[in-house]
C-alpha cells in the first residue's frame, strides 16, 4: 500500500499548499468606485467557495455591512464618493464589527498608515500591487497577522 500512502501524502501536501495560496474566506465585501479595480479584486479574490459582494461607493458599503453581513473580510478603497472607506470603517468599528479589513489606496498621505493601524485587525496596501501581494495580505489578515 505504499502507492496509496504516497498518493495520499501528495494529495495532503497539495491541499496544504492550496490552503496557503487561497485563504479560507467564505464571504468578502469589496468596495471601490473604479469598476476596473472592482473587477480585478473580484477576479483575484473570488473562487468557488467564496461569495463576493460589491459596493461602488461608501454608502453602498454601509448598506452591505448593515444588511448583508456578517462578512469574513472587508476590502475597501480609501477615496470613494458619498463616504470615504475609512469613514465607513470607523463607523463599522463603533458598531462592534471586528471583521478583518484590507484598505487599498493610491494615496501617499503620511497619516494613512496610522489611521489604518488604529482600526485594529486592518492592513494597508498601496496601489499598484500585484495579485500575489494582494493574496498574501488577505492570508495574513485572515490568519490574524495584520
Image (cartoon, rainbow, N blue to C red):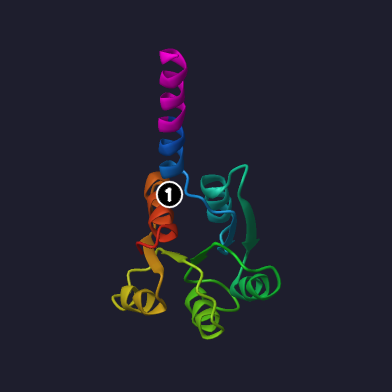
Instruction: Report crowding for label 1: few under 14, some 14 to 19, many 20 or more residues within 10 A (C-alpha).
Output: some
Quarter occupied by residue 63: bottom right
The answer to which of 137 and 31 lies nearer the viewer is 137
Residue at image position (61%, 71%) is 61
Where the N terminus falls, by quadrant?
Answer: top left
Quarter occupied by residue 62: bottom right
Q: Is residue 112 left or right of residue 8?
A: left
Q: Residue furthest right?
A: 67
The answer to which of 78 and 1 lies nearer the viewer is 1
Residue at image position (49%, 82%) is 90
Residue 13 at x, y = what percent? 40, 31
Which residues are the magenta region? 1-13
Residue at image position (56%, 84%) is 95
Where the C terminus falls, by quadrant?
Answer: bottom left
Q: Is residue 14 magenta?
A: no
User: How would you classify the magenta stretch by its main secondary structure?
Assistant: helix
Residue 104 at x, y = what percent? 43, 63
Residue 123 at x, y = what percent? 38, 65
Question: Is residue 95 placed above or below 52 in the rendered structure?
Answer: below
Q: Is residue 73 left or right of residue 68?
A: left
Mark 1 secondary-structure assignment: helix
Question: Is residue 76 placed above or below 129 in the rendered structure?
Answer: below
Residue topped by disc 1: 135
Amino acid at each position: 500500500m505504499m502507492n496509496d500512502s504516497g498518493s495520499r501524502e501528495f494529495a495532503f501536501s497539495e491541499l496544504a499548499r492550496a490552503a496557503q495560496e487561497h485563504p479560507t474566506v467564505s464571504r468578502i465585501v469589496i468596495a471601490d468606485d473604479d469598476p476596473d479595480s472592482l473587477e480585478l479584486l473580484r477576479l483575484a479574490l473570488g473562487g468557488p467557495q467564496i461569495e463576493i459582494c460589491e459596493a461602488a461607493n461608501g454608502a453602498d458599503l454601509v448598506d452591505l455591512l448593515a444588511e448583508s453581513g456578517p462578512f469574513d473580510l472587508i476590502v475597501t478603497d480609501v477615496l470613494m464618493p458619498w463616504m470615504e472607506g475609512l469613514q465607513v470603517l470607523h463607523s463599522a468599528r463603533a458598531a462592534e464589527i471586528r471583521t478583518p479589513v484590507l484598505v487599498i489606496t493610491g494615496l501617499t498621505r503620511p497619516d494613512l498608515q496610522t489611521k489604518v493601524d488604529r482600526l485594529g485587525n486592518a492592513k494597508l496596501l498601496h496601489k499598484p500591487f500585484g495579485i500575489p501581494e494582494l493574496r498574501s495580505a488577505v492570508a495574513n489578515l485572515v490568519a490574524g497577522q495584520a
